[in-house]
Image (tube, grey):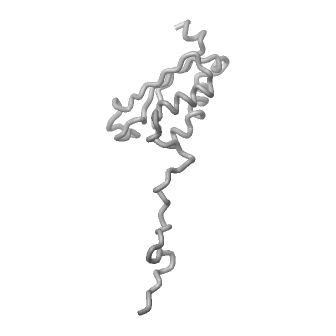
Amino acid sequence: MTELSPPPGQPGPGQPDRSQPDRSQPDPSKPDPGEPGGRAARMRAALAQAFDPVALQIEDDSARHAGHAGAAPGGETHFTVRVITNAFAGMSRVQRSRAVHLVLAAEFAAGLHALSLDLRTPVEKTAV
């Protein structure tokens, strides 16, 4: 009996289907949402390394945004971030925001949807 060959581009018996991306292995270019410590811990580490803050606070606001655009069932999509650092001296509010977004670009690519930012220098913190 003769075996029939599969149509071109189709896997044969016992061969993996290569028509779809292999999702069995995590994409190493994107943060793993299940990584110990979660997104807030990764954000804290990235921001601390980039800005050497004197104060850093990260709050997960995802529960308040359930059902809104960008919200995910597991949360970790909406955060309030407060950073007080000398690194922001001489920067406008827009420049500070862009700097934080750049540092967290991998998180945005992996499902982070929105940030509420409070970005100040130590002098500005005491003036408020």
Q: Residue at x 59, y 30 (%)?
A: 98
Quadrant housing residue 91? top right
Outermost top residue = 127
Outermost right residue = 90
Q: Nearer the viewer, residue 54 or 108?
A: 54
Q: Nearer the viewer, residue 55 or 115?
A: 55
104 horizontally vs 68: left or right? right
Quadrant housing residue 33? top left
Depicted 30 relative to depicted 2: above or below: above
Outermost bottom residue = 1
Quadrant housing residue 121? top right
Q: Residue at x 44, y 91 (%)?
A: 2
Q: Position of residue 84 (x, y in %)?
A: 56, 17
Q: Quadrant of the N terminus?
A: bottom left
Q: Residue at x 50, y 50 (%)?
A: 26
Q: Position of residue 70 (x, y in %)?
A: 41, 40
Outermost left residue = 67
Q: Nearer the viewer, residue 23 or 100?
A: 23
| Total labels drawn | 0
Q: Position of residue 118 (x, y in %)?
A: 51, 20
Q: Position of residue 67 (x, y in %)?
A: 32, 38
Depicted 34 relative to depicted 14: above or below: above
